Image (cartoon, coloured by chain):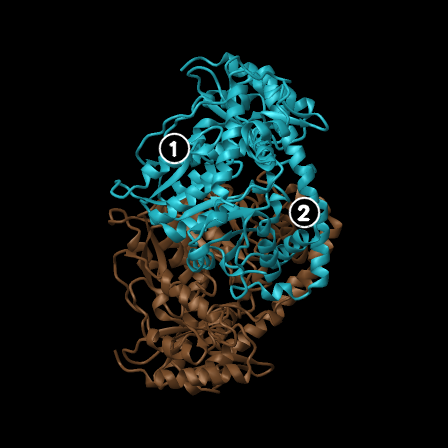
Chain colours: A cyan, B brown
Amino acid sequence: MDTDARSHRYEALADEFAGLIDRRVLGPGDRLPSVRRLSHEKRLSVSTVLQALRTLEERGLVEARPQSGFFVRRRPLARAVPEPRRPPARATKVDISQRLVNVLQLNARAGIVPLGAALPDTALLPVAAIQRLYATVARQQPNLLRSGSHTDMNEVALLRQLVRRSMSWGGPLDTDEIVVTNSCTEAMFLCLRAVTRPGDTIAVESPGYYLMLQLIESLGLKALEIPTDPRRGISIDALDLATRDGREGKVKACLLVANASNPLGTTLSDADKKRLARLLESRGVPLIEDDIYGDLHFGERRPWPVKAFDRSGNVMLCASFSKSITPALRVGFVAAGRHHAEVMRQKTLASGATNPISQNVLARYLESGAYDRSLRTLRRAYREQVERMSDAVSRHFPEGTRITRPQGGLVLWLELPGQVDTNALFERAAEENIAFVPGDLFSPSGLYRNCLRLNCGNPWTPAIEAGVRRLGELAAELPEA
Amino acid sequence: MDTDARSHRYEALADEFAGLIDRRVLGPGDRLPSVRRLSHEKRLSVSTVLQALRTLEERGLVEARPQSGFFVRRRPLARAVPEPRRPPARATKVDISQRLVNVLQLNARAGIVPLGAALPDTALLPVAAIQRLYATVARQQPNLLRSGSHTDMNEVALLRQLVRRSMSWGGPLDTDEIVVTNSCTEAMFLCLRAVTRPGDTIAVESPGYYLMLQLIESLGLKALEIPTDPRRGISIDALDLATRDGREGKVKACLLVANASNPLGTTLSDADKKRLARLLESRGVPLIEDDIYGDLHFGERRPWPVKAFDRSGNVMLCASFSKSITPALRVGFVAAGRHHAEVMRQKTLASGATNPISQNVLARYLESGAYDRSLRTLRRAYREQVERMSDAVSRHFPEGTRITRPQGGLVLWLELPGQVDTNALFERAAEENIAFVPGDLFSPSGLYRNCLRLNCGNPWTPAIEAGVRRLGELAAELPEA
């Protein structure tokens, strides 16, 4: 069967209903036609219709009710989604590190309302199980620390588990292409070191994750912001244009989050992922893909990374379990395709081996099946927290505030009405012990000054509700710039 | 009492005897005059004379025999020490990473004679005790992993132990100046990031440690090689000259190993350390000090780091326990003085927190006293291995080969006679599964092409003896360049 044609069909149907909902032809609480009826009327297979409905569900537009069918959701419709913006066509020098550190340090202050860094409450995470595994592994494999030199960088047990897990999203990865790292950020750092030199231009999403921008800054690179659609993700057309031959400041790598992007929460469609993989392959531009949120999707199916559509080893897939197991583990990885040897070289130089006990703890946890059980709970929790945050913003923020509808992850992105400056809001909120991340940190060209990102990693509490309410009040008092 | 004057006196006496031994006025096995007689004749205090004799012992020139006094050693005198060389007066771009990776990868090959990377045999290390502590800590402190976010970078238990240990070498450090890192190399990386920008010039020892040069290369810095005396260490006079105002390409930081340097094995005298601290303070040049070998001295007393002579927070002391506990632990630290806030910032950006379980394992091990017991054994082992390596080189390498007399650590540095190229020797030795590090990697200007470094981290075996013999034969066959 032609997968492409099918994916176009279910997406077309999903888009049709999304349009009806947006124009209020279908209102909150309205029931959608049944699967059987849609299948008949549209001449589509039942599975294509179901996939379209699930896509709408993933976008937060409809909800399934047992034995009753699909209904338009009541809540998120109170708010519109942010509009796409047009970043500069030229690469920009990045200068965010100093401000970024201030934001991260505020977020770490005792007693803060922690809406800044995208960090889960550890109460949600399986840290007790992990810690017990440290005791087990240390007891049962007494010679692990003898292998921790430069000679044995990767624990085979972990490589095997990473490959096994990749089977659920279009893998398998190859054990020979994986390098274990101290974190997802280190993985991206090594990839950039492997394929760029100072002065090179890197294509990123706009808005894009601040730690990616910080890596670009620290390696003396420049960022070329590619426009994104706040519902669908990065514009492949714009990336096509930006990577055409003869462009000045040729793009040397592309660095992005295809699944539950940060900060927008968008997941590229499979068709777009495939097109992206083909495009970058044909242009000879390596893709560095951050898939840290892939396991934290809100829909039914684990979305595939772009890596699953890679035929030539052009995609370097980076991830860790910091959002889904615990950030304290300090184990990430990269499946670097044809760049493996160079990435391994960079790892040898940058930090040598990764702690073998921690690697084995992670391997055992993944092997046990406990990770999958924990993930189901965690995904529900994040999804609910994102919804509650979205509700609270709807109630407490100024009229005209726009909100994303994340398809996974643990953050929400807001666009405030008018020419306000969320850096000023940050200063005011800091005085009242409320942290968030100003939009300025997601764009080297300063394109999102009236936007901000909220962390939804914590279970809902009166303190968080009060923090969001107060933040909304402060936002309403902001002067127009 | 005036410490400076006293240290000059004992060093002058030690130098006098070193000269007599070098010129063979005193031959192997000759007895030195008694302490009482020397004290009387030279009008020096008994303690000054004793310190001079211990200095000669640390340099490997004499040995104490119980109830008999000090005697000229029989063995090392078969070989002279390398001569100082004169590096270029200008800063040099560094380009060693590619060759360095080849060397490190060869050293990791199965079945290799491991004379390359400075890595101890794990059989010498207390890895079993460390691994048991992982089980204990994981059991007894069940909430450790809950603290592993950006919010709690450093485990207080570890900070306390680091401060406590510093008391034995002129500390105490201040808990508020310490940043825990993943390794000593990461500590130096963060320090360089904190005080330099691309294009800056960094003063280093010549010959100097290749991972320092690699850091300089990867951060887009330049290296200014400062001459060293293969018996005494870096020339403070030359550093004085190089850091004078008005010099073009002003030195922005100095990066060195004051205790058991790498590759020469020299330890600066206290007088030189004090002078170095004062000089760099007065010039406003931060010192990044790598003290990873400080605990692995061959003499009686734990040598002080330059940090002990720092009055203004100008010295950033970096270390880890990779050579003395296990490289698999992945915990190092930096006591960054007045640069602490900026180094902490860089750590937040570069890699976030360090695994809290590993931090606590290290803290408990240091607290238990087991580290000090293990160190005594380890120091004896390294010292003996360095001596046996030295003996074997004396027997098997070409006439005219010069050898260092390390005062600590686990490496030996050789200068081969004539204009031979140890890169060619490396290729030949690789074919026969023997690894070492060519001299070229210790100087960006290529000043040590006829030198090489040998790792003495492994207990002596027939295989190592055979490897050294074969390496000596291959060296004898090298063509003059």
Please tell me whether residue B235 is drawn above or below residue A93 in the rendered image. Answer: below
Q: Mark 2 — residue?
A: A371
Which one is in front, A309 or A243?
A309
Other residues around mark 1 within 10 Å, as few (<14) / some (14–19) / many (≥20)? many
Chain letter, disc 1 residue: A
Whichever of callouts 1 and 2 sits on the residue coming sooner in the sequence is 2
Please tell me whether residue B180 is drawn above or below residue A140 in the rendered image. Answer: above
Q: Position of residue B336 (x, y in %)?
A: 49, 46
Q: Position of residue A432 (x, y in %)?
A: 58, 21
What amino acid type is highlighted by mark number 2?
Tyr
- Horizontal placement of B61 versus A152: left or right? left
- From mark 1 to mark 2, how far is it between C-alphas? 37 Å
Q: Quadrant of residue B100?
A: bottom left
What amino acid type is highlighted by mark number 1?
Pro
Q: Position of residue B364 (x, y in %)?
A: 68, 55
Residues marked 1 and 2, same chain: yes
Q: Is residue B207 visible?
A: no
- Between disc 1 and disc 2, the foreground one is 2
Quadrant (top left, top right, bottom left, bottom right) of the C terminus of chain B: bottom left
Q: Is residue A462 visible?
A: yes
Which one is in front, A364 or B458?
A364
Please tell me whether residue A390 is drawn above or below residue B350 in the rendered image. Answer: above
Chain letter, disc 2 residue: A
- Element marked by disc 1: loop
Q: Mark 1 — residue?
A: A444
For the point 24% across and 42% down, which residue is it? A246
